[in-house]
Amino acid sequence: MNYHHAQWAAKGHQHHHQGGGRERHLYARSMERAAVNIHRTDSSYEMLVFAPGRIREHFKLEVRGGELLISYVPPEDFPRPDWVHREYSRGGFVRSFTLDESVDTGQIQAKYVDGVLQVSLPVIAGKEMTSQAIPVS
């Protein structure tokens, strides 16, 4: 999987949430609060989703077509204090990543350790995308 050719960039999603304007604004802002780093090994792509303070059972990962969807929905009774100052959110989020045919989607694994969701996307041997330089004339 090639970062540039496979369009790994997260896609924007529209989400609707019941509640007042301020709550809806804070919830919508938190939907984008999971930073992601991706690195390539000899046999896989390793994705780190930085999402501290979440509950492991509330993460959802699924492959839908050629996309990997990673989402988190906090429990209904999750406390939402009236913050005096807030720079960090433990709210819900959705991230979407386009996969290419080199990823073995049946072997994707995930674990949540120390506030980081670690997702391993194995590459099918021999199906790695090759890069090709294109001359500019």
Image (cartoon, rainbow, N blue to C red):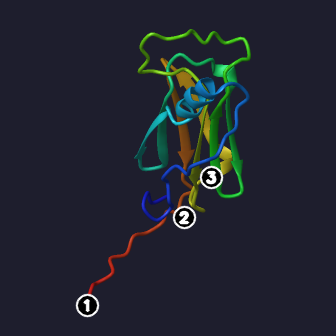
Mark 1 lies on residue: 137
What amino acid is at disc 2?
A: Lys
State which quadrant residue 100 falls in: bottom right
* Relative horizontal placement of residue 1, taking residue 74 as reference (left or right): left
Mark 2 lies on residue: 127
Mark 3 lies on residue: 104
Closer to the camera in the image, 82 or 75: 82
- Which residue is found at the position 62% from the left and 28% from the top? 21
Judge whether 13 appears above or below 57 on screen.
below
- Which residue is found at the position 51% from the left and 22% from the top? 89
Q: Where in the figure is residue 115, as x and y percent of width and height? A: 49, 20
Residue 123 bears which disc, if any? none
Instruction: Estimate the spatial distance between the alpha carbons at disc 3 and disc 2, rounded to whole Å.
Output: 10 Å
Closer to the camera in the image, 52 or 13: 13
- Which residue is found at the position 62% from the left and 52% from the top? 104
The answer to which of marks 1 and 2 sits earlier in the sequence is 2
* Relative horizontal placement of residue 98, taking residue 40 as reference (left or right): right
Instruction: Estimate the spatial distance between the alpha carbons at disc 1 and disc 2, rounded to whole Å.
Output: 31 Å
Mark 2 Cα-neighbour bin, 10 Å: few <14, some 14–19, many ≥20: few
Judge whether 55 appears above or below 72 on screen.
above
What amino acid is at disc 3?
A: Asp
* Relative horizontal placement of residue 135, taking residue 61 as reference (left or right): left
The answer to which of marks 3 and 1 sits earlier in the sequence is 3
